[in-house]
Image (cartoon, rainbow, N blue to C red):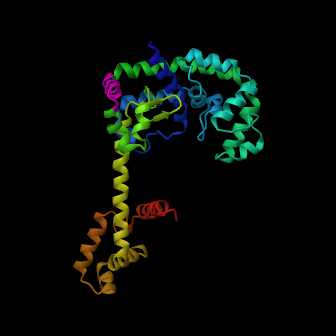
Amino acid sequence: MSEHKEKSYLLDFLVSFELMYEDLSDDEETILDRIVAPTYKKLIMEYISTFSEKDIFKKFVSKDYNILSSLMLNQKNIINFEQYLQAIKELDKKEFKISVSKIFKIENTDFLLNDMESLELSSEAKWELLLLLENFDQLKDDLVLSLQQEYAIYCSYADKISDQYPEKIDELKELFENSTELYDVVFKDLLVLDKKDFDDLQEYLILRISVNRVLLQYKNKLVALGTYVYDYFYEKSKEKDLELEMMQNVLKVLADQTRYGIIKCIGNGITSNKEIASIFSITPSGVTYQLKFLADKEIIRKDNVTKQYVLNNELIKSALATLTSDLDL
């Protein structure tokens, strides 16, 4: 395996532990379902199941931080799994605290309770991190053994993906060979990254399991991309445009006196065309037109049981929540 591929595998392996906190279930369609082949997703799901219930990994990777990948990225000289594992073996409790303080940019390398309070983490994450710092020496042997076992499993799945989906890997390699195209296609519109900073990046890695991830490390002049990252962000941008359109539709309805009055009627259980017509002094056919308009915009929908119009509460709440968030109200 080439040095470059080894580093790609190592980083993808360490980042992939974050997937145990992502909902990739089959209950509802996700962006991942729309962009990757079902067999690709199946391989990822199978791989995640091999470590998701192992407590040792949850101690080092939470929803708020990933100590495992950060330890690698903070050391430029680590380029393969053997070097990474050796670096872990050589850490003692004191050195581990120093490393973690660098990860969280804490000046005090003793990492006291006061330092923990300053971190923008949930209370649960702070407590788990504190326990990790205190118990590292006792956890290290279990971590090393578990990493050895899991990395062998990871490599088998990453190799399968490389063999079964070479066209996606090649697509990304072609983008890597032309940094201008890579910037224009992926970063210019989808991520906020200055062109000069991007041109300073010297190393590009492929994340096979973390197919939707983008990872930038300016210190190491590194960029890592998931194999489906362009597809993923393209779908995200379409989703955002759709959310914006729906929010605008809701606001337009709320700004129209008659349509706002009609949705208030429906919210209060008044669904008869004649009754609504009499309230607003319009014809029943005029009400029919307005109801069709509201239904086309998905502001209202027909109840599956009663077949009467009801409000699309989720859409209206979502639109108002987006407005509140955008305006920081």
Which residue occupies the extreme top position in the image? 1
Q: Which residues are magenta?
A: 166-179
Q: Quarter-wise, where is residue 109 in the image?
A: top right
Dominant secondary structure of the residues highlighted in magenta in the image? helix
The quadrant of the image that shows the N terminus is: top left
Quick check: is 172 in the magenta stretch? yes
User: Which residue is situated farthest in the left direction here?
Assistant: 285
Q: Give above or below for 216 relative to 192.
A: above
Please state the horizontal and vertical placement of residue 56, each as a whole percent of the image: 65, 28
* Percent of width and height locating residue 273: 29, 78
Quarter residue 68 falls in: top right
- At a point 37% along the width and 33% down the height, the residue shown is 228
| Left or right relative to 67: residue 5 | left
**Residue 108 x/y as whole percent:** 74, 37
Left or right: where 323 falls relative to 85: left
- Pick the residue in front: 134 or 90: 90
User: Can residue 327 be seen at all in this image of the molecule?
Assistant: yes
Residue 291 lies within the magenta run: no
Residue 124 pos. (x, y %): 68, 44
Near-viewer residue (296 or 78): 78
Q: Residue at x 47, y 62 (%)?
A: 321
Rendered residue at 24%/73% (across/down): 289
Instruction: Please state which of residues 200 and 86 is positioned toward the viewer in this rendering.
Output: 200
